Image (spheres, coloured by chain):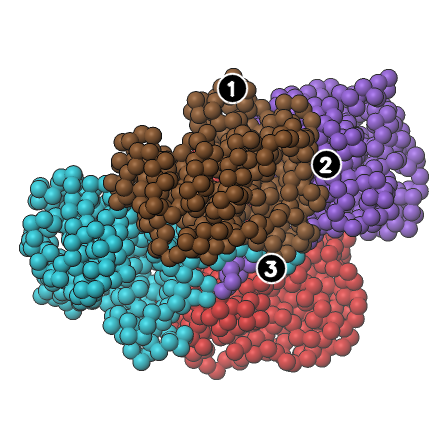
Chain colours: A purple, B cyan, C red, D brown
């Protein structure tokens, strides 16, 4: 079973009603977090924003009434900030975590924490040393529909899980430059689903078999990547998860999860754009799906922040903490290897090749 | 509340395991009943069929291995028949009921029993005098989805009913000749829904307001009829039912019922032709509905016969008996008057104009 | 058919890119509008808020960075405001409209404009005299699901409408004091549905038959009101609308519309709280509905403002203007009379009793 | 791509309007076929039934008015029979096919044709030699919902298929004795899904990765079998199919298929028992699923016979013929080996180990 961190945070001064947050990274997801922090959380204040692009930071700071900092070091080191939201590019995450931990700030970090196992371990070690609150931005865990499937497992409503099915498909592929730097579909996209598999089943993954292909003609093969993938995860208790991904559907953003267990099945389906429909001579017509993950998961961004703030205030472990940051990366690395070698890969094999590194 | 008939049948000899049935009328609905009787009911035998058209009777008899009788009198009077299924034209029902009652046969009669209140009362009186089992063919009561809505009321799951909504729309209009002899939409089509309103709400209807129009261009106005109708029924306890009808939809046979009560709502929707669907760039597509009431209600024909046979065998009152045959006709007559006069009509007003007649 | 207002506005100075809005009334719905104006509309500025309760105004102004005005007259008369949003209590609407029209401001007014026909006519006359843009807050028209049903009629997808069904039921009744001042269920609640009937069918209503009862034990009968109602509307072209209402469901906020026409049916159903569901041994379980109209219609508030701002900027008639403000009130008064007198009421009869008044 | 058999049958005398059928095997599925043949197919006659249990044959023959034969040889060899339906135990199929082919009868054979590749090849060779019509009973292909998914691929509606998902789960496990003789879950149960993967995707399967476990406590592990399984199929064009199975759900017979392609997705879901539902304070409740594959697939049995009879009469190839009988068995054998060896198995590897055998 997945261990719940029981370590208490050692920063009692964070446990207060007024929480001051600085956001590093003012891109698309950074703006989402900054707006939640500035407007939707009672007793929480957005004190500063920071970006490598000063204009982007300036615009966001003006819109939300926050100070603008040109230097993340300054923002992290300042005494007027209690918590740091790290929303910058993935390769900067580990360094920023290490600095924020040293400054004894509570840390919220976008996923993935890192594409490199040793970098990730360095960051997690710093968090452990400092004992600061830490939450990773696996926002889907805070989507009410996903939570309902998880709750059906936790509460025993569907019994012991036998099979988990996850479909996670984007409505349109990102630019090729993005794809080249993404670490590949398993670390960039499926990583969310690897987290979901652990969250839904409640058990650790022990082996991975992955397949994939370049089916969309978007040029991923040149980058050594695939655009369509299937991953099969074996869990420690024998439960099996099947995940399928595509970089492009014709019909919108497709996100479904199903947990099948000894007493029943819990499912989440896609919400339609609206609930109007037609019935005419050739059948029924309903609306399609949103194309936007921001629309689909709007609630989850607020709810993950409510949970993070609550954890900081009550000095309780966060709901998605250090124990949850590492496994999705390890599973992703195993998936990559499985695709390359055409055989199922024990997760322990990936761990073994990382021996000697902290974690 | 609707009284349940408590009178036991006085024909103990019918209460036996082997039941011999004769079917009068070999048209579309007669063939449905004959096939159920011949093939789907253990211990029940189709002994004879009868029709004014000898070829039609001959064909059905041959197909199902039953004798053919040219004369209903002969079939009813014969000693080899325990129960009569009356599936002939509506204007012959009352006479056949009177004869079958006199011959002490159990009687199953298609709806409506009659379009004339005095004829209906004559038939019901004969049944009461003879004490024979009697069931009227309001088959929708035996459809599992309709039963589930009724059960939600009876079991208290939705509390006290406040509002009932019924949509009942045909996929295509019958021939104009049929319409001319039908007694009008309220006696021909809505009569099923009037029965349903009583069945679902579990209370008697005390007044009716009806509207309608000729919207389909099928010529009903020449026959003094409407092809699109709305009827509002006031129940004795204040519950209100709204029924809408159309002789023609573009999309198939549309049958929906909803009961809204103090604790919730019970609904039945239309089954699609099958459960395949599509999701493409312009939305979702599902199949339409069946055009055929025989397909939609196939189960109900078997189940109403199972219930009838069970009632005959156990000498218990039928589930749709003498108390249920009359109210739909009276409500239908009130609806007709309401449409003509443009005002709500108390059901008692229709009864009053029928004073002096049995019932 | 419903006439579209063709009168152009005569306030060319309003047609500019930067629009300054003042909100009068900082209660629940006023706060919704103020937040939309302040945060969600590019080029639109919330310049001031005003309320009879200074603390309420102060809190909202501080939250949204707007000035606070103690006096609506001052806000309306000021040169720094281009448009007024009237969100105060219904009995103040007409006066505020007259003043805002005199000051040549664009006017957005919450529904209902008035509970008194002569007051409403006085307000509409002032708008016509001043030629200012005017939009009434029938927000459901801007809900995407409602729009899709309307579009199916306008685009001819379902052909000529024969029947419209509307269910509109609150999740919990308002306080009794509110109900006493509400003008009764037909003017307070069904008024939205009367607007919807005209919007969906696209034709005027010519007569009304209403029924209702006190079924919930919430004390409305003492106020001469009902808590459960059914209204049947006859449209000028023979289309019939059936509306049902309840002040309280056990299962959440229930809002459904169906348009049945010669070529098909357009329907809108209730969105569930989320899309998770269960399938266990005793059947399937889904979530219920939201209890909150603010949640259900969140999108519509933004979209009605986008439409209003667009109309003001382009000097085009608003989508819900003077022609749409009056009919729902007249229909509501007819419904009230129908309930009292137990007969269908021609809308012309209500108009006739208002003879001699402007409008 | 899957080759369509182009060989015409060489039995012109079968191509006549009156077709006489003999059914061998009067167990559950034999009775289904016999009833379809006897009652639902115009111009088709059930002339004889045959079973190793004379009482069982006697009962069915009496019920359906067919002769009873104690000896399959006699039935096959008789001149009064045009077509043989082989519904006996799987180990008898190959022999009966060989005999029926020798007797130049049209052959309908229940799936699987054999659990042994060489036996299957012997039977297929006999069919090819005799040139008789042959159809294997993969009835799901004739289910309208499954057909709709296939049609969406064939017609190009969803574009080129990238991913196929199949869930196929029984409501309750068969007796342990049955399981012991079943050949294991992949040959007994998944074989239907292997056929479906080829049918839906329209391409051959080239490799298989399978996982499974004993999760239900029904004793399959003693028989070297699993009760819960996941199989991943690689198709020749790169499409990937994921199939999951369980011997027991808590909620009924669960059969779903999804094809995801470049232009959209085609899905089939489970039909509920009926269309009634509830909405109460704690959410919505719907019915569960049937427990019976006979109920779920009732239509498909009739439609596969209609197709078979049409093929025989028109001398056209059957829709599920010799080319479709072999691949599911080969894929099943590969799946078994994959489960044993923990690696993906090329289908060619199974073929290679069967070298020297006919086929």
Give SS at disc 2: strand
Task: Say whether residue C4 is visible.
Answer: yes
Give how far apart the Cα atoms at labels 1 and 3 are.
Answer: 60 Å
Give how far apart the Cα atoms at labels 3 and 2 are.
Answer: 43 Å
Q: Marks 1 and 3: which is nearer the front?
A: 1
Q: Nearer the viewer, residue B293 or D74?
A: D74
Numbered badge on residue B11: none
- Marks 1, 3 in one chain: no
Compared with A231, C112 (above or below) is: below
User: Which quarter shows the C terminus of chain D?
Assistant: top right
Task: Please state if C314 lies on the left or on the right of D312 as rendered.
Answer: right
Crowd band around label 3 with a 10 angstrom C-alpha radius: few (<14), some (14–19), many (20+): some
Q: Which residue carries the number 1 mark?
A: D223
Q: Which residue carries the number 3 mark?
A: C143
Q: Could you tell me which chain the residue with mark 2 belongs to?
A: A
Q: Which residue carries the number 2 mark?
A: A211
Give SS at disc 1: helix
Give SS at disc 3: loop
Give the residue at x 56% y 61%.
C146
Residue D30 x/y as whole percent: 37, 38
Q: Could you tell me which chain the residue with mark 1 belongs to?
A: D
Q: Nearer the viewer, residue C324 or B299?
A: B299
Residue A296 x/y as whole percent: 67, 47
Task: Please state if B131 lies on the left or on the right of A183 as rendered.
Answer: left
Residue B213 location, quadrant = bottom left
Count every numbered label the image shows and give the total: 3
Q: Marks 1 and 2: which is nearer the front?
A: 1
Give the residue at x 28% y 43%.
D66
Q: Nearer the viewer, residue C28 or C88?
A: C28
Compared with C325, B133 (above or below) is: above
């Amino acid at each position: 079973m997945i261990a719940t961190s029981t370590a208490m945070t050692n920063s009692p001064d964070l446990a207060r009603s007024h929480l001051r947050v600085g956001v590093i990274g003012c891109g698309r997801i950074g703006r989402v977090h900054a707006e939640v922090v500035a407007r939707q959380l009672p007793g929480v204040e957005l004190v500063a924003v920071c970006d490598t692009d000063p204009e982007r930071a300036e615009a966001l700071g003006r819109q939300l009434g926050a100070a603008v900092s040109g230097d993340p070091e300054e923002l992290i080191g300042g005494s007027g900030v209690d918590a740091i939201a790290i929303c910058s590019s993935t390769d900067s995450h580990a360094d920023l975590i290490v600095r924020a931990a040293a400054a004894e700030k509570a840390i919220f970090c976008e996923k993935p924490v890192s594409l490199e196992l040793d970098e990730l371990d360095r960051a997690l070690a710093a968090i452990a040393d400092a004992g600061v609150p830490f939450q990773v931005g696996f926002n889907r865990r805070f989507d009410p529909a996903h939570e309902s499937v998880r709750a059906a497992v936790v509460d025993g409503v569907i019994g012991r899980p036998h099979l988990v099915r996850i479909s996670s498909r984007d409505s349109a592929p990102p630019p090729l430059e993005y794809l080249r730097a993404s670490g590949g579909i398993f670390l960039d996209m499926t990583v969310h689903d690897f987290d979901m598999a652990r969250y839904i089943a409640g058990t650790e993954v022990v082996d991975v078999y992955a397949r994939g292909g370049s089916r969309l003609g978007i040029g991923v093969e040149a980058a050594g990547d695939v655009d369509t993938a299937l991953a099969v995860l074996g869990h420690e208790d024998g439960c099996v998860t099947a995940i399928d991904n595509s970089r492009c559907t014709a019909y919108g953003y497709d996100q479904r999860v199903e947990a099948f267990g000894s007493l029943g099945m819990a499912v989440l389906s896609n919400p339609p754009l609206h609930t109007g429909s037609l019935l005419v001579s050739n059948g029924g017509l309903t609306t399609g799906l949103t194309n936007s993950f921001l629309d689909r998961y709007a609630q989850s961004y607020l709810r993950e922040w409510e949970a993070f703030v609550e954890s900081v205030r009550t000095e309780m472990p966060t709901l998605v903490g250090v124990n949850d940051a590492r496994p999705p990366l390890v599973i992703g690395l195993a998936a990559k290897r499985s695709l390359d070698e055409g055989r199922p890969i024990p997760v322990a094999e990936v761990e073994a090749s990382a021996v000697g590194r902290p974690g």
